[in-house]
Image (spheres, coloured by chain):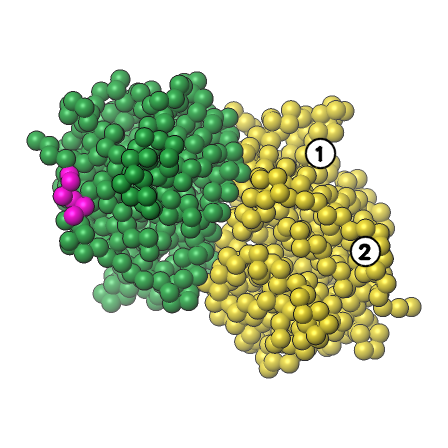
Chain colours: A green, B yellow
Amino acid sequence: MTTVPYRFYLPEDKIPKQWYNLRADMKELPDPMLNPGTMQPVTEEELAHIFCAELAKQELDNTTRYVDIPEGILEMYKIFRPSPLIRAYNLEKVLGTPAKSYYKFEGNNTSGSHKLNSAIAQAYYAKQQGITSLTTETGAGQWGTALSEACAYYGIDLSVFMVKTSYNQKPHRKTVMETFGSKVIASPSNTTEAGRKILAEDPDNGGSLGCAISEAVEVAVSTPNCRYVLGSVLNQVLLHQSVIGLEAKTAMEMLGEYPDLVIGCAGGGSNLGGLIAPFMQDKLLGKKDTKFIAVEPASCPSLTRGKYAYDFCDTGKITPLAKMYTLGSGFKPSANHAGGLRYHGMSPVLSKLYHDGYMDAVAVEQTKVFEAATLFAKHETILPAPESSHAIRVAIDEALKCKETGEAKTILFGLTGTGYFDMTAYDSFNNGKMNDYIPTDEDLERALANLPKIG
Amino acid sequence: MTTVPYRFYLPEDKIPKQWYNLRADMKELPDPMLNPGTMQPVTEEELAHIFCAELAKQELDNTTRYVDIPEGILEMYKIFRPSPLIRAYNLEKVLGTPAKSYYKFEGNNTSGSHKLNSAIAQAYYAKQQGITSLTTETGAGQWGTALSEACAYYGIDLSVFMVKTSYNQKPHRKTVMETFGSKVIASPSNTTEAGRKILAEDPDNGGSLGCAISEAVEVAVSTPNCRYVLGSVLNQVLLHQSVIGLEAKTAMEMLGEYPDLVIGCAGGGSNLGGLIAPFMQDKLLGKKDTKFIAVEPASCPSLTRGKYAYDFCDTGKITPLAKMYTLGSGFKPSANHAGGLRYHGMSPVLSKLYHDGYMDAVAVEQTKVFEAATLFAKHETILPAPESSHAIRVAIDEALKCKETGEAKTILFGLTGTGYFDMTAYDSFNNGKMNDYIPTDEDLERALANLPKIG
């Protein structure tokens, strides 16, 4: 018999009623987003043309430490939250490690990932404001699926610009979004100025998140009563996703645990930023010396090989500029790259923390990631998303290090979602057809050559 | 604020530690399975050539009311159980019904369905007995996936004979099973006598569950230290699946509820038999007068249009015979039929209860099923499996009847799984390409013409 249960769900009275805004505790704040026209810090009013008003406010609010979660969102969260904190007993056993491993499993809702936490919040605020349609982009499709579910619930029309390579590789993702009533457009498309421009230069362009963002923003700002929403990178998204870390921290406290090590996959940073938030608070306040590891794909290594600089958030260069680790807004990961985590930049908050030494980062190759995914699936009976499996890879590596040193570290990692829509990638791995791709230094120099010249 | 929560998880001390054997409370037992050679009731010893010893015992045990769940299985159940009992607040609201609707959601594990409840039990007993390999069949793939997960965990080799039409339509299902380490063979195959015989008669035969069973049983009985396992129909499977109903009943009691109506989809009967078990006990003992509805596809209507007779469980006619509602062991649902629920027969226990008037049955057409699935997905944020959506269809119909009559009935239905691997079917529905298929009376007469002549 086990003393700590496999799956631990917070009791109802312990469920967070506020989000936590990590910026309120940072010693130094990230540099502000800039208006691409004026090169001055964007104002809430300017942002409110793109985002819903409340979300524009959250984006720029660096001081409010705790933000009340509206009752309407709490009600929706109850449909799929709390998510379980799972002790990886089976994985520990097969690894023979003295380390204790916990994972926060966010794939336990039908969107299949943590993205629903912010999707519901953003759709809720849009509904409150009387917005009738939203636009967004999606890469692997997790965000698009989550937002489709949220918009179906609130009765908001949604257009999703889906990265074309992914659109073609994952027709089932498109079908899910359509089932929830969304319109899905392969990006770059000829429905926008930004898309037509990219296609004119390169008719075979397979798209990128940066490109899809350009298209989605263009439609949002040119359509009455429409706004744009984004599933990662932004401060507001990290705020909503803090629910992951808050639940995890309370659950661990109830189990008498505190992590020595917190590990998460990092694309734009939404899951990682949410998971680490309350633990990072303890570190920033000098209460704990937890180690944080961001895990990114070797094929899209913004933290480990990118540059900390102002860059556009999109390829069409119509969005505000953010100071972040970036590979250049024109960077496209190899078509060979499976799953998400394909954004050229990284959350400005996480970029700043990494730059200031509060967090580590490692890049891993995808065959190693799928090895870890398969081992995990067989022993934990959860088929992980490729994205999440980046965190699993490093969690396993760290547990194996403990086996060597004999240390009984407590590891917490984020299991952001399930891999049901990634079977083509699993199939290629199972049949030995999966390759690794690492951009050369020349590839990266080329992509970074066009960074905007700021300050 | 809601008084009954959206999702209710049983506290740890209320989790069932025993399965419930409905046969122990039946006024009249189902007729016994017959040995196809002797036409005499099969003995435990005979069954033990096909099944693991403990499972053969459970199959024939009509008297033990409660069976202790072994500690090893309880430990594995903890990984994904208890499953939530969900109050369908959102669905109730959109239907505008006074009825209260609850569903027991069994898709909250990565196999995506309730099948894992019995897969773990069967793999556990095999492991205890020192069995090194198992064979089985799968139609839509839910059972094959669940058993693959269980066998990966226990380190048992697994060969899955997958109905060929499904194998071709759902390559991703195959990949999931392979990811868990299973071998997947399209059935009918040329790897068995039974498969070769069927292919000789009809080279384009798309297969059926009955045919895949013949192949799997043949391999099991001719391979040393190998046994056959089945995911539905059998008494042992209904025993394991009683955990669904036991959890649901305890949860409802804790919420101060008792269902007036229990609805489940029915293919071989595993989910329905498990869900209704403890409620049916109350009816058999005269304590309650709950109504039970089995929902089957109009394209494979064993209860509503089949014959209550002895029939083979497989197409190759090598398995024991069971007295059940059957469409004939050669029956194949139209290729047009999406999802599972495609077995020619029905659990002997459920067949007997239906025959004796304890349960009702309705057959529904698949476009109506997908209409219900889509409405449910949009409002409950869960993408249901086509199988489960049969129950949703009738639960919605019953809730709408309550709207007409003003009755505030309490409805409980089984949501057996998620539809992630059924996007081709959803796509065909979304695009208006889904057809209904109902076998003609002539079709059924033809399939029933070859029933074995018994007594």
The image shows residue A274, relative to residue B387, as above or below, that is above
Residue B163 seen in the current view: yes
Tell me which numbered mark, 1 or 2, is placed earlier along the sequence. 1
What residue is drawn where x is 69% and y is 47%?
A: B265
Give me the disc on residue B13.
none
Quarter of the image holding residue A314?
Answer: top left
Which numbered mark, 1 or 2, is in the foreground of this view?
A: 2
Crowd band around label 1 with a 10 angstrom C-alpha radius: few (<14), some (14–19), many (20+):
some
Q: Are marks 1 and 2 on the same chain?
A: yes
Considering the numbered disc 1 on the image, is that residue within a helix, a strand or a loop? helix
**Residue B182, percent across and down?**
51, 67
Q: Quadrant of the C terminus of chain B?
A: bottom right
Q: Position of residue B130 (x, y in %)?
A: 55, 76
- Asked whether, in this view, residue B138 is left or right of residue B309, the answer is left
Residue B228 visible in the shown view: no
- Name the residue beneath numbered marker 2: B443
Q: Which residue is mark 1?
A: B397
Residue at mark 1 to residue at mark 2: CA–CA distance: 29 Å
Q: Name the residue located 59 percent from the left edge and 34 percent from the top edge.
A: B375
Q: Which residues are magenta?
A: A446-451
Between A80 and B422, the one nearer to me in the picture: B422
